[in-house]
Image (spheres, grey):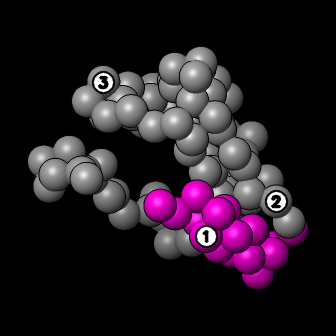
Amino acid sequence: MISADEKIVYKEPIGRDWRRLSLNEDDVLKIQKSTYSVLKKFLEKNHYDEVYVNVGKNMLKHLIDFEKTFPHTTKITYSKGRGIGPKMTDMKRWIETNAK
């Protein structure tokens, strides 16, 4: 179980709508560096056998080197389907299959 001091802090979206978010290359690199730094610190204290990633194709292209942040033993599973409905169905199936 994750304690309150180990939670990753939520930050408000940049702009009004993440679906229409437009970032230049410098913005993307800055956000990636910050995000991966937080993720690495979090992973130093926690171990995961598998991580499920549920993002659309526009955000997926910004996850360059994401998998390198995790130990090579961690399985990374990406959501399947096009659109919110199919992705949520896939995520529900993954949760039900992996819940212990």
Please give the name of the residue rendered at 82% of the width and 59% of the height, measured from the top-left corner: 80
Q: Earlier in the sequence, mark 1 or mark 2?
A: 2
Mark 1 vs mark 2: in front: 1
Query: Pointer 1: what residue?
Result: 96
Q: Which residues are magenta?
A: 82-100
Mark 2 is surrounded, within 10 Å at the Cα level, by few (under 14), some (14 to 19) or many (20 or more) other residues, namely some
Q: Mark 3 to mark 1: distance in Å?
A: 27 Å
- Residue at horizontal 75%, vertical 68%? 90
Q: Amino acid at mark 1?
A: Glu
Q: Please state which of residues 10 and 79 is positioned toward the viewer in this rendering.
A: 79
Most foreground residue, 8 or 24: 8
Residue 5 position, x and y percent, is 13, 48
Residue 13 magenta: no
What is the three-letter code of the residue carrying label 3?
Glu
> SS class of the residue under badge 1?
helix
Extreme-bottom residue of the structure: 85
Q: Does 67 sit above or below residue 79?
A: above
State how far apart marks 2 and 3 are (Cα).
29 Å
Q: Which mark is residue 44?
A: 3
The residue sitting at 57% across, 30% down in the picture is 74
Q: State the residue position of label 2.
A: 80
